[in-house]
Image (tube, helix red, strand yellow):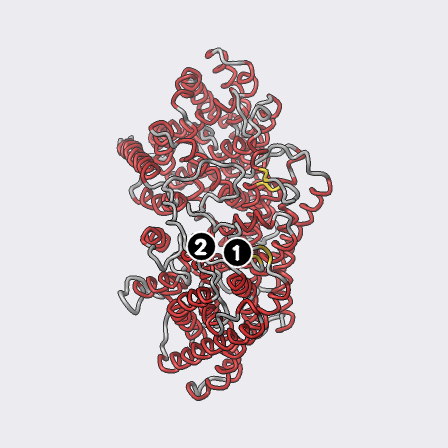
Amino acid sequence: MSGGGSHSSRGPLTYAAQLVALAVCFLLLWGATRYAPAADESLGVIAGLGLFLIGGTLAGEVLEPLRIPHLTGYLLVGIVAGPHVLHLVDHDTVNSMTKTNALALALIALGGGAELKLELLKKGAKTLIIATGVQTVLLLFGMAAVFMLAHSIIPFTAKMGLGAIFGVALLWGVLALPRSPSAALGVLSQTRAQGPIASFTLPFIMSYDVVVIVIAATVTTFVKPLVIPGTELSSSAFQELGHAILGSVSLGTTIGLLIVAYLRFVNKQFLVVLVALGFGFTEVLNYLRLEPLLTFLVAGFLVQNLSKQGDKFLHTIEETGSVVYVIFFATAGAHLDIPLLKQYWMVALVLFGSRAALTWLGNDVTTRLAKSPPALRKWGWSGLISQAGIAIALAGAIERSFPSFGASFRSLAIATVALNELFGPIIFKAALDTSGESSKAPEKERSEVVASSP
Amino acid sequence: MGLLLVAYLGSFLVGGERSLRGIGLPSSVEWVVLGFIVGPYALGLVASSVVDSVRPIILIGLGWLALVAGANYGVTPFGPVPGRRVVLALVFGLASGGLAGAAVYFLSPYFVSSLAEDERRLLAITLGAASTETTRHVMRWVHERHGATGPLFRLVSDIADAEDVIPIAALAVAFSLTQPRGSMLGPAVSFGATLGLGFVLGVICSLLLGREFRVRESWGVLLGTSVLAIGVAARAQLSVVAVLFTLGLTLAVVSRHAGEIRTMLLATERSALLPILILCGIRLAAPKLAPTMALVAIIVVVRVLAKYIFGGILGRAVPEARPAGGLAGLGMLSSGALTMLVGLSCALRFPGFVGDTVLVAAAVLNIVGELLGPPSLRIALRRAGELHELPPPPPSSDELPEDDETSPRPPWADEDGPPSEEVP
């Protein structure tokens, strides 16, 4: 993620030049697409990756005066260049690009795990535990209630009985739970924020992923008999869940120890290790039906807390991620189904607003119970709005488990997640800026400025 | 992934008197040999089709290496290459490559009767391009290993650096002449588009790197511009290597941060180069062995002769080169990564006899150069009194350097880092 920080030296002329450069990049790819159709799909992938990378970086910079996070710029470039707007990058190309997501997710999870310092976790344990309980109960049942109330404007529930609607509403409640570690990490990486909001948000989101996995499996198992007539309650889902969680934690521990040993004894070409983990090992984990996010999270946590290499490890991941995340978010933007959002915008808006309100309420209750600092009480909810990959993956899993309504459910989910994905990071960054946490960061960025050659 | 790991493991094994710290042999030909050994004609562990399956990655690797070469063009550890020497290098490079190309053009009908006129022309241009380069790593090697310093060393360093533009230009011409039927770009427009695309994106990149140089943002800008250039060039069937070289050169000329950019890019060179060289080795093939080897023999002989004659001329014309005579020219026989880039680029774009021959020729020229170049250069410099005893090199650190936010070192840079830019 491009660093933010002091950009005061950039005048209107710089921003104008960046806008022109952005336009030229779009024009170049438009020209290539128009006059030299690629015989080989891979060439389209390369050009698309280039546009996403340079366009995303530029858009992040151009939007900075508006205090919009860089990752929203990346998303916007993906949306504009993607198959639903300018069609410079088509569906197949976007799908091919998503292969880079394995690396991005591995880096996000490793980085997220490495951000979880044990002493900080101990300090904030009370808040984290209360927040987990409150947010889960409020969002799961609150969103289910909203869904029930709004079912008349949700087309695919029209022919369902009340029991089935209740089941689907619970599934919607589950879908409201996941947050976006990547978005949180992205905004925090850009702002380098320090303070109670930053200290709470990332550990909460990271550890909450495990809770989401467990609750999703539980609710899906219990809802099946309600929605699919003739289905009986089965414990097989829990066996698989146990296997996935225990396996992921064990393997994550092993990888973490191996990384510690590598950093201690070899400490060379660490990028190769990261790439191997991101691309190669993710495949292995998928084959074993383990959770890559949880595995890498545990590995990162171990490296941070069991070795002296944590900060160096984190720094390397941040540096590598700065490029990978641009592609990750731009690809996510290209994936956003704009026509679908147009179709479902009203329902999606209701669900988005309700989720944000419940998240705020959950934060208010949590901070009162935990006697948290005022800044956290006021803004602690802001980082919990974003949703992205995990929510969409969950919607995909629900679609596969409930084929009768799954496709429509997933479409509505994508439309709602799109709103969360677009507005969540903006709200989070605004909160960090308003609370002053962004400006409390050390002027690290300044030290990255290499003096101009004389 | 496997290639990356092989290159990674192999990087621990390289060492010894003939090798260069962080690079291996000056020509890096051992990686090509490694690729050939694991490839279909030796152990058969990797099929040559793997090269086609990772074509996008190869294009990105080729483009990136060309960018590094472009950004470093005309700059040696002594500073910018003086204009007179650039002209000298261009004349020498043109003469050397031109002679090889002409020999191939006129002699090829004796060995391959089935070649059409345009194929013959293409073969001449591409083989000429492959027989021009003198790798700058041989200069680094003789400096690091034998403490070479002095006017002759500086002269050959300058020429070796400045002649890189000839094979790149030849490659751009070859690609422009072979635009597919129905293409909207004629040869002249295509050549102009090659330079134009690199120039425009180079200017944009320079503009975006701005007044202040922020390392983290710079990687996004550099990578993004390069990958966009590679994608557009590949779609338009332009030479990716030539476009990216132009981009790098433009960046080096226009950007006020050229020094930092060079340092950043040089640090990534090995990570990109080793897998590409291994793939070159895997891709080596000569279905028509006899004509291929005959043409390769022709350009090897012409290159050796051309270099020797040039050394002789240099010895008469430039006082610094007088003690070495023709050996100074033979010292510049070492070719390296750029030659392999030309070979692989041609193999991908012109599959069949032309592409195969150029790639084989590039590999053979590197081997011959490795055998003859460094010893000749050492003798030439000794005659000129420019070799000095060196203290034993310090042990290389196994630790990553301490975090230094001001360092433009990328996260994937190898620990040896770029070569020192200090004047010896």
Q: Residue at x 47, y 51 (%)?
A: B419
Image side of residue A28 versus residue B329, left or right: right
Foreground tag (2 vs 1)? 1
- Give the residue number, with chain letter if any, for mark 1: B68
The numbered dot on residue A84 is none
Q: Position of residue A279 (x, y in %)?
A: 38, 47
Q: Is residue B227 above or below residue B44?
A: above
**Depth check: B234 or B3 in front?**
B3
Q: Position of residue A307 (x, y in %)?
A: 34, 30
Question: Amino acid under label 2?
Answer: Ala
Q: Is residue A82 above or below residue A167?
A: below
**Depth check: B317 or A340 in front?**
B317
Q: Position of residue B388 (x, y in %)?
A: 43, 57
Marks 2 and 1, how far apart in space? 10 Å
Question: Amino acid under label 1?
Answer: Val
**Label 2 secondary element:** helix
Q: Is residue A72 above or below residue B267?
A: above
- Give the residue number, with chain letter if any, for mark 2: B272
Q: Are marks 2 and 1 in contact (CB under 8 Å)?
A: yes
Image side of residue A8 versus residue B314, left or right: right
Q: Quadrant of residue A454?
A: top right
> Pointer 2: residues within 10 angstroms few (<14), some, or many (20+)?
many
Q: Are marks 2 and 1 on the same chain?
A: yes
Q: Does the rendering let one see residue B303?
A: yes
Q: Position of residue B390 (x, y in %)?
A: 41, 53
Q: Does the rendering let one see residue A347?
A: no
Q: Chain of mark 1?
A: B
Q: Quadrant of residue A286?
A: top left
**Label 1 secondary element:** helix
Q: Earlier in the sequence, mark 2 or mark 1?
A: 1
Q: Residue at x 69, y 49 (%)?
A: A20
